[in-house]
Every structure is written in structure tokens, then in C-alpha cells.
Amino acid sequence: MHRLNLTIDEALYEQVRVFSFIEKKSISQIIRESLNEYIEKNTKTKHQANLILEADDEKEILSILANDEFTSNNDFKSKFNL
């Protein structure tokens, strides 16, 4: 695991602190779950991120980032009723 410093406003901190107490989870666990949910919800960006993580060199990464016409398999299937 990696350590991460995070700055949030006081009201959000108080809310997450109470959630942490009620759900008997650490604030770190709540943040990890929230980040995972965010990543799963953003399938197009998630797929692009996975391609970047698997890329062999900078040229391939730049090519992935430059391709604005990227469509995920799920979006393609939905668009064409497959």
C-alpha cells in the first residue's frame, strides 16, 4: 500500500469521521472504497488508464491519450444494441 496525504474541508472531515464511527470502518477504508467505486463507475477512463499502465513506452502512452475517439466495448455494444 501507498501512504497518501489528503486535504479536505472541515465539514467533510466531520461527516466521514461520523460515518467511520457508525460503520466501524477506518476513514482510510472508506476512502479506498470510494476511490474503487469512482474508478468502476468511469469505465471509459478506467479502460484508458489500464491501457496506459500496460503501455511499453512514452510514444504508446501519448497515442492512447491523443485518441479522443476511444469507445469501450460496453459503449459500443449499447450503441449498436449488441
Image (tube, rainbow, N blue to C red):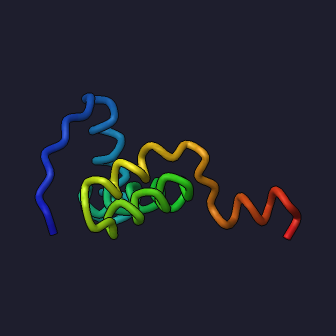
Tell me if residue 11 comes above or below residue 55 in the rendering: above
Picture residue at 25% right of the left edge, 29% below the top: 10
Picture residue at 40% right of the left edge, 58% below the top: 49
Q: Position of residue 40 (x, y in %)?
A: 51, 62
Quarter holding residue 30:
bottom left
Quarter holding residue 9:
top left
Quadrant where the image shows the N terminus: bottom left
Q: Position of residue 50 (x, y in %)?
A: 40, 65
Q: Closest to the observer: 37 or 22?
A: 37
Tell me how many marks there are. 0
Quarter holding residue 77:
bottom right
Residue 2 as seen in the image, left or right of residue 32: left
**Residue found at the very far right of the displayed protein:** 81
**Residue found at the very far front of the displayed protein:** 59
Quadrant where the image shows the C terminus: bottom right
Tell me if residue 15 comes above or below residue 27 in the rendering: above
Picture residue at 25% right of the left edge, 61% below the top: 57
Residue 49 as seen in the image, left or right of residue 42: left
Picture residue at 41% right of the left edge, 55% below the top: 34
Q: Position of residue 68 (x, y in %)?
A: 55, 42
